[in-house]
Amino acid sequence: MNDIPMAVLKRACIAVCMVFALVPAGVAQNEARRIVEEAQRRAESKSQRYEGFLQVLDSKGKVADKRWVFMRLGSHGRSKSVLRFVTPAEVKGVALLIVNHPDRASDQWMWTPALQRERRIALQDRSTRFFGTDFSFEDLEERDVNQYDYRLLGDEAIDGAPCWRIESTPSERKTSQYTKSEVWIRKDNYALAQVESYIKTEVVRRLKYSDFLQVQGIWTGRRMEMNDFRRKSRTILALEKLEYNVPMKEEDFTLQALRNPL
Amino acid sequence: MRLLFVLLVFASPASAQDFTYRGFGEVQSTLYPQTTPQDDDRVVVEGRFRFEPAYRAADWLTLSGSIDARLDNLEQVRRAWRVDLRDRGVERPALSLRHAAATLRRRTFAVDVGKLFIRWGKADILNPTDRFAPRDFLEVTDDEFLAVAGVRVQYERGPHSFDAAWVPSFTPSRTPLLGRRWAPLPPETLGTIELVELPAAFPDRPQYGGRWNVLGPGFEFSVSYFDGFNHLPQFAAQPLSDRPAVALQRTYSPLRMAGGDAAVPLRWFTVKGEIASLFTTNEDADDVVLYVVQLERQTGELSLVGGYAGEIVVERRSTFDFAPDRGLTRAFLGRAGYTFNATSDVAFEAAVRQNFDGVWIKGQYSEALGGHWRVTLAGVAIGGNQGDFIGQYRRNSHLQLIARYSF
């Protein structure tokens, strides 16, 4: 023992301590990832269609109603979505095409019939609100489990339902306006209950799910309330006529199809 | 029509959900504080109704159209109650088929037949490559696109898309009416020479063009080619033998265009560029290269577009033409918009010639009232010298109030 220098002993002690300190963190990461993967697996479907009724409530109490039709083909990370406004009349026909990628941010194009042209939404513009709602363009992307790193923060109930509270941080290849998000996943059915999104240390948006129903075997919160804390406004989105695994064609999710009014 | 009938016969029955429509009724009032030497009317009121139905007759076939009805107080709208299919008269038609198309789609292959809007360029403030996009320039600074009659074929394969257009019938841009405030006439001609407008000489050869577009992960670019005619006219002037007057006739130069555009999103801005080489065989028209470079950014509720439009005259030959596309070059162009809330927004646009001979600034405030109404108040200020394309309209600054009911 006398032959072992004190400095080496110190280093060994520090290393052992670090290993013990890292084990719970690693376990928490793995556990968090497993929960999110399971939530994603249970939400998986070949396609989705719903009619969304939106109420945008600004800080002065003004209410604006909007309605869109949403269609998605494919599942997490490899899906394509088209969202087309139905009302109000002046934005009828405005449409958004989102092409999600497993390894990078999505591609998005917006079609404006009055201008007869589509516009690609640049990455740096994704923090902009989508057509006067409190959803940003980025919020309309589909989150894939592999684009984030996770950490289990603990347990917390949302509306009386026990949930896992998980921190998700965009991985290096993922471009995001948010520094991190905290995600609440219900323990009883692995459905998303709430997402709080941060810029640096400030919570800027909160998306809360309610009115849960099992639709074709998939637990879905059919009411979403997005709060924009910086604007002090909120948007309530109610999913109507929700269906999963509806037959859809790849050709309805192209720029050509986006220009088509139907 | 026969083609349309055949398509409908072979289309499978569709449900009521496959029919949709949109449209609006609008009253637009424009007040010009100043008169001009050729026009002392100060108030223009125009009413417009638009109906745009679309019907998905089968999975592979969509029929869509748009009909406009107009009326105004100054007879810039023709007082003839027949539906104008070709829309190439001097005045705006009272009733017009603005757009009518049958779209056939199979996998990533699409064919549009009918009266179509074909827009190619990527830039937002000027599109030199948009050669199938004539416009109504009756009020030069408040223009809108006109459709062209033809066939368009589109094919997408991965990140590549190919676009080909064939337009057998020529649609010109509508130019300002002679004797009205927006007519581009030198002041020395006013009151000294009687001008008589002869029917336009429309080209009778088809136009065609193609475009290849590539969507990359961090960029987008396209190259395009066009062989046809300039939709903006030249004026051929001839003295009349029977009286002291000059006859003006609109003619349209043959035009070949090779061009391209690109968009590259960077950390702070998206950079967009568009360039077109325009060559003609007309000995009275110029060969030019037009280009635009712009930066674009949207942050929060603010959207900003700013850039420069340039022109290189390869060979100068023209005598008397009407060329708003070139009139907005050698200029800094910009647009800014801010959305206050779900119902109201404000926007500013400006064009400033690099030598300050022409300045055009527009500001507008718009407010939605309920789910159908929108009221827009706009002000346009124009200044500069008579010899400049923008500056010649310096007495046409105006205020505009627009009330629109959308359905």
Image: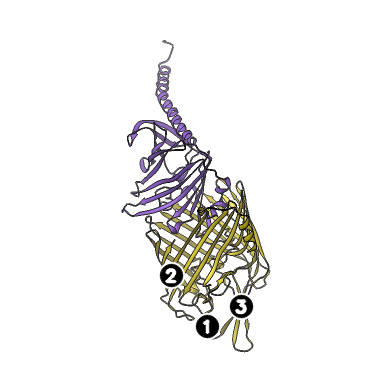
- Residue A195 visible within the image: no
Mark nearer the viewer, 1 or 3 = 3
Give the answer, above or below, for where B62 lies relative to A74.
below
Give the answer, above or below, for where B195 lies relative to A102.
below
Amino acid type at mark 1: Leu
Which chain hosts label 3?
B
Amino acid type at mark 2: Gln
Identify the residue position indicated by label 3 in the image: B199
Chain letter for the part of the structure drawn in purple: A
Query: Which label sits on residue B28?
Result: 2
Front-most of B203 and A15? Answer: B203
Image coords of residue B252 (percent x, y): 63, 71
Amino acid type at mark 3: Pro
Category of crowding for the residue at label 1, using alpha-carbon neighbours closer than 10 angstroms: few (below 14), some (14–19), many (at least 20): few
Q: In which quadrant will I find the N terminus of chain A?
A: top left
Q: Residue at x 36, y 42 (%)?
A: A203
Earlier along the polypeptide chain: callout 3 or callout 2? 2
Which chain hosts label 1?
B
- Left-right relation of B323 to A133: right
Location of residue B114 by image quarter:
bottom right
Q: Which residue is drawn at 45% across and 72% down?
A: B46
Category of crowding for the residue at label 3, using alpha-carbon neighbours closer than 10 angstroms: few (below 14), some (14–19), many (at least 20): few
- Residue lying furthest left in this view? A60
Identify the residue position indicated by label 1 in the image: B190
Category of crowding for the residue at label 2, using alpha-carbon neighbours closer than 10 angstroms: few (below 14), some (14–19), many (at least 20): some
Front-most of B277 and B312? Answer: B277
Marks 1/2 in contact by CB < 8 Å: the verdict is: no
Image coords of residue A175 (percent x, y): 48, 42
Earlier along the polypeptide chain: callout 1 or callout 3? 1
Q: Do labels 1 and 3 share a chain?
A: yes
- Residue lying furthest top in this view? A1
